[in-house]
Image (cartoon, coloured by chain):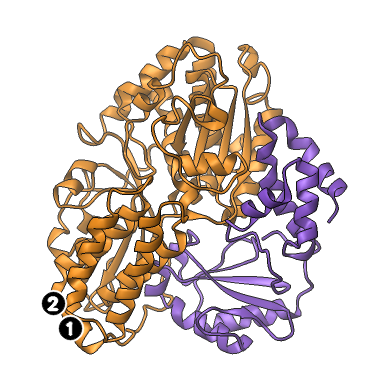
Amino acid sequence: MDADQIRAHLDPIRHEFADPRSLVMPALKFAQTEKGHLTREDMAAVAEATGYSPSFVESVASFYDRLYTRPVGNRVVSVCITLSCMLRGSDEVWEALCEHEGVDHHHGGTSADGRITIQEAQCLGYCDRGACIQVDAEETQGPFTPEEAVKLVEELREAPTPAELWR
Amino acid sequence: MPILNSVYRHREAGKTLTALADYRAAGGFKALEHALGEMEADDLQYAFVRSGLRGRGGAGFPMGRKASFLPKDSKLPKYVVCNADESEPGTFKDREIMEMNPFQLLEGLALAGFAIGAARGYIYIRGEYEHQARILDAAVLAAREAGFLGTNILRSGFDYDITVYRGAGAYICGEETALLESLEGKRGQPRLKPPFPAVAGLYGSPTLINNVETLAALPPIVTNGADWYLSMGTEKSPGTKLFSISGHVVKPGNYEVVLGDTTLRELIYEHAGGLREGRRVKAVWVGGSSVPVIGEEHLDVPLDYESLQGVGTALGSGGCIVMDDSGCIVRACLRLATFYRHESCGKCSPCREGTSWFERILQRMVDGEGRMEDFDLLESLFRRVSGKTLCPLADGAIAPIRSAITLFRDDFIRVCQEGSPRPDPMLPATVG
């Protein structure tokens, strides 16, 4: 994504902040919607659009879980594994998904076809619907059995990738 | 005691109030009209103090007193920041308010803004709640169009608007100074205090920071009066509180109870449908995961700040996680240790290093490779980490583990010797 596109996204909200540094995060989140992760070029464009140095922008991007500085799959599937969900079977859901996508059971990862990334998430705030799963930044869903979770990723694999990848 | 759905209007109305007309029909924005038309800012602030409302995010600090700490003579603009970074394990009450009743939060934010003379309000919402953030965006637009936000609100001369700001996945941003750093576009790492946000908060300006549930409680307090709010609950814990209950209960969900009126047993067995047939309570984290764990012997404790403190735990955020006797306490502690290790921001070395050691030691216990010296090792680590950090994350990591070792020592010793096979989870059942 280039700096002009980012500027156009920021212009309507610029007046809401006394310090333009507050625009760095919205800029990063928007820049990420193009490829689903942030490349060096994306971060340089954010730096140019906001007026901060590329190294500062990268330091911000690297801090947050939902800003990806490495490539991920077309769809990112976050499996909540924190206590409430664990008691409701999230480990079983996690393992079923890792098995199905052929990724490492400890760290998750991206399927060989590049379609699906399975990642662990810390408490997603849907403990009443554990075991819960969030696809990209869509509304979290649940509760899931391992079979239902596998069905969800199978459907995701067939579904078209959204035009904007909000994560 | 019965559920009392009196403070949060969507509960009283029994339906979602995402349309402005529905919120108005349920009595919405009457408080703002009343305050802007007939009250002075100081009277409003005094009403908050009198109501005794305590912060619902976890610390329980009196909301009105916090507002009164903002300097009156400051030349700098003032801000209200709503902490909607709800990330405490087991807590999902703010999500319900934002999803079902966004206008009550906006009205509360506007009231708080008027009371302190703020230039703008911000809602810092966790990145994972994009769905809820969009509901808030739509509500802000609707409220602005109807004249409840923007310039010269209800022809009172008061200018005030609200910005919804998305985080990007960091538990630490629920800590108020880390939240401010993040809102200022930086890495979300806590600041050294003092100065407190009331004096130097967002952009160095005086800032009032409150949780979603706290701010949403303000409109009914203004409409019905501080005495009405004070008449509910106990002397030190007035009002009602939303408890999120999850884990091994049949009907997990949010329940609004009058503080001090309901016992933990009633919350679990009457409201949340109890446990599965033949199961007993093993452990309960009443106020989210950062509080000491309690066992079956304390089920009759009334749910309020002082009673919970009396049995060695805390009301915290009201995120009540219940584990029955099918669960393994060491595995539960390990899972929480992993959470805190992952969420430690890395600024203070005792926390950054300590949380990863807690996890490693608990992991070897679960693997059956624990050693008797590990108990002393953990305790010595706790002493070296506790109180030596800028924010309470590390203490939040220690509290559930330390208390579990004290309370369930026999389980820990057995697991050290034999390991802990993974127990069967409770599979999807009735969801309340």
Vertical placement of residue B120 versus A89, above or below: above
Mark seen at residue B410: 2
Quadrant of the image containing the N terminus of chain A: bottom right
Mark seen at residue B414: 1
Residue A111 visible at all: yes
Task: Tell me the shade of chain A.
Answer: purple
Residue B405 as seen in the image, left or right of residue B64: left
For label 1, count other residues whose C-alpha is less than 10 Å away and answer few (under 14), some (14-19) or many (20+). Answer: some
Q: Chain of mark 2?
A: B
Front position in the image: B112 or B266: B112
Front position in the image: B40 or B121: B121
Task: Tell me the shade of chain B.
Answer: orange
Vertical placement of residue B248 versus B367, above or below: above
Front position in the image: A117 or A1: A1
Residue B34 visible at all: no
Q: Residue at x 37, y 43 (%)?
A: B5
Helix, strand or loop under label 1? helix
Rendered location of residue B235, percent (x, y): 20, 31
Measured in 3D between alpha carbons, the distance from the residue under mark 2 to the one under mark 1, in whole angstroms, is 6 Å
Rendered location of residue B315, percent (x, y): 28, 48
For label 2, count other residues whose C-alpha is less than 10 Å away and answer few (under 14), some (14-19) or many (20+). Answer: few
Residue B277 as seen in the image, left or right of residue A103: left
Q: Are marks 2 and 1 in contact (CB under 8 Å)?
A: yes
Front position in the image: B196 or B42: B196
- Give the amino acid at mark 2: Asp
Q: Residue at x 50, y 14 (%)?
A: B74
Quadrant of the image containing the C terminus of chain A: bottom right
Q: Quadrant of residue B421?
A: bottom left
Q: Chain of mark 1?
A: B
Residue B113 as seen in the image, left or right of residue B370: right
Helix, strand or loop under label 2? helix
Do badges 2 and 1 share one subunit?
yes
